[in-house]
Image: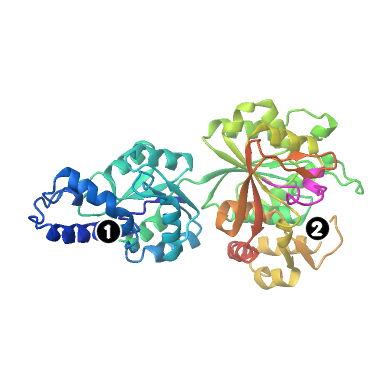
């Protein structure tokens, strides 16, 4: 879940520092002290407006260096992030008060060991701007001390949490939190909407597809599984045709769903029977289902772990889905790799180009140099899964002998990377890049002026397997 957090008076003790220093200055100039207890700090004293503004403008940069974290803020922010939430620090410091607000804020957060995923500075005088940022980045909860910011977030469908201060206590419209332990408990128990997903898989190709399918089925607290669609696959050195592979994948999916106690009726759909690179453009129930689900939902994630043919055809047949889907694809190799001659990519290069050129929101998990790190031995898997349940034992058997490749004692379980990415993006590092071109030799050519896609650079393998074992052992 994505959480937005204001800094001043939510993470930092801005008001405490400001009031303390205003009191000191008031004594120096022999004023009357606090004359309006119900006002905000800058209006509490009987200073002329010009004098107050001058003092504030000349001292706020100095005072910012005195800010300390509110008790337990660092502890619980880091704990929320470790639990899989994405932390967006959204502060109204871009309002002219500071010479370099971004650099100043980065240094302060680092100094106090506050971990986050993105820092965004807005104009503090424009309360709508924070709500717009929350909407843009799909923030589920915004924690702020400003009543106006909370109101704008509420109006835009974002859940506001009002951090209690002396100056906002008259407002009773929003849920309040008094400290960071309360925030942590609230967020931990918050029931956000599940993520709508379609898994597009060549399930009988290798055992890794079945591990990914089982991983998704065991994570239904996160995923609303709209459909499981079957991608085409074909091994030239095998006798089976693409049609044979479709049927075998279909049966494997049904079996895995049964072992995971997932009702598969009206959830599994056969897909394309050839590739776009062979001039194939026929409809399939899978392509129709992708379009149907995409059009009915505000947002659907397509988790693609095979040839990307079904998704490319769906985009070609109904371009309107481009703004309603996000594709997470295991395919190709890292950006600097000499080629993309891995199975998912090379099967249908025209489909890859179609998806790339469509400008659909796209995240790529490269196979070699990234997902290839997910190699594991059979002995390690047995230690965690053997005898736990029927599903775990079935996956183990398929791990050692998937029916196509020779019996192996260790494998790369590539496809679980896509599921893990959707469960916890903190286990991955990534970079937004200009969408690369695909050369004739299948390698990537870097660009600098095209639409953006996200490329995954690394995986915390231990975190992924730790979570997979917890799910599959159950």
Q: Determine if the magenta segment contains residue 15.
A: no
Percent position (x, y) of residue 127?
33, 39
Tell me the residue that label 1 is attached to.
178
In space, the residues marked 2 and 1 are separated at their CA atoms by: 55 Å
Disc ID at residue 402: 2
Res 12 → quadrant: bottom left
Q: Can residue 247 be seen in the rendering of this structure?
A: no
Q: Determine if the magenta segment contains residue 336.
A: yes
Q: Give left or right: position of 152 versus 348.
A: left
Ranked by sequence position, the earlier of labels 2 and 1 is 1
Element marked by disc 2: loop
Q: Give left or right: position of 17 versus 287.
A: left
Residue nearest the observer in this picture, 25 or 190: 25
Q: Give left or right: position of 15 versus 339.
A: left
Res 371 → quadrant: bottom right
Part of the protein shown in magenta: 329-346
Q: Residue at x 55, y 52 (%)?
A: 220
Q: Residue at x 87, y 47 (%)?
A: 235
Element marked by disc 1: loop
Most common SS among magenta residues? loop
Percent position (x, y) of residue 380?
70, 71
Quadrant (top left, top right, bottom left, bottom right) of the C terminus: bottom right
How many marks do you count on the picture? Answer: 2
């Amino acid at each position: 879940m994505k959480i937005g957090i204001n800094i001043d008076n939510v993470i930092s003790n801005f008001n405490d520092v400001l009031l303390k220093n205003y009191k000191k200055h008031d004594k120096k100039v022999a004023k009357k002290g606090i004359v309006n207890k119900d006002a905000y700090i800058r209006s509490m004293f009987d200073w002329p407006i010009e004098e107050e503004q001058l003092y504030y403008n000349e001292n706020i940069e100095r005072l910012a260096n005195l800010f300390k974290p509110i008790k337990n803020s660092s502890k619980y922010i880091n704990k929320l992030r470790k639990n899989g939430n994405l932390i967006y620090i959204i502060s109204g410091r871009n309002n002219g008060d500071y010479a370099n607000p971004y650099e100043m804020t980065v240094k302060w957060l680092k100094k106090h060991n506050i971990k986050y995923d993105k820092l965004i500075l807005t104009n503090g005088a424009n309360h709508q701007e924070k709500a717009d940022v929350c909407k843009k980045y799909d923030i589920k909860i915004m924690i702020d001390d400003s009543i106006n910011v909370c109101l704008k977030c509420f109006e835009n469908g974002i859940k506001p949490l009002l951090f209690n201060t002396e100056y906002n206590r008259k407002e009773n419209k929003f849920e309040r939190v008094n400290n960071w332990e309360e925030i942590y408990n609230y967020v931990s128990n918050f029931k956000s909407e599940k993520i709508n997903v379609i898994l597009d898989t060549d399930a009988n190709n290798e055992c890794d597809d079945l591990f990914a399918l089982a991983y998704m089925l065991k994570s239904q607290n996160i995923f609303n599984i709209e459909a499981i669609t079957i991608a085409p696959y074909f091994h030239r050195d095998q006798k089976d045709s693409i049609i044979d592979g479709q049927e075998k994948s279909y049966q494997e999916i049904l079996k895995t769903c049964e072992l995971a106690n997932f009702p598969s009726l009206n959830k599994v759909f056969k897909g394309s029977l050839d590739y776009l690179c062979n001039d194939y453009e026929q409809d399939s129930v899978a392509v129709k289902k992708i379009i149907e689900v995409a059009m009915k939902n505000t947002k659907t994630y397509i988790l693609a772990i095979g040839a990307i043919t079904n998704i490319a055809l769906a985009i070609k047949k109904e371009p309107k889905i481009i703004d309603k889907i996000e594709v997470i694809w295991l395919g190709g190799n890292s950006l600097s790799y000499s080629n993309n001659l891995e199975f998912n990519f090379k099967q249908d290069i025209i489909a890859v180009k179609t998806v790339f050129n469509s400008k659909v929101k796209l995240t790529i998990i490269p196979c070699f140099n990234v997902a290839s790190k997910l190699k594991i031995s059979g002995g390690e898997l047995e230690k965690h899964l053997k005898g736990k349940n029927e599903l775990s034992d079935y996956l183990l058997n398929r791990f050692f002998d998937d029916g196509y490749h020779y019996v192996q004692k260790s494998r790369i379980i590539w496809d679980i990377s896509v599921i893990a990415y959707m469960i916890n993006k903190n286990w991955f590092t990534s970079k937004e890049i200009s969408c690369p071109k695909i050369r004739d030799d299948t390698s990537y050519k870097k660009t600098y002026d095209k639409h953006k896609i996200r490329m995954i650079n690394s995986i915390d393998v231990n975190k992924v397997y730790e979570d997979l074992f917890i799910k599959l052992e159950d």
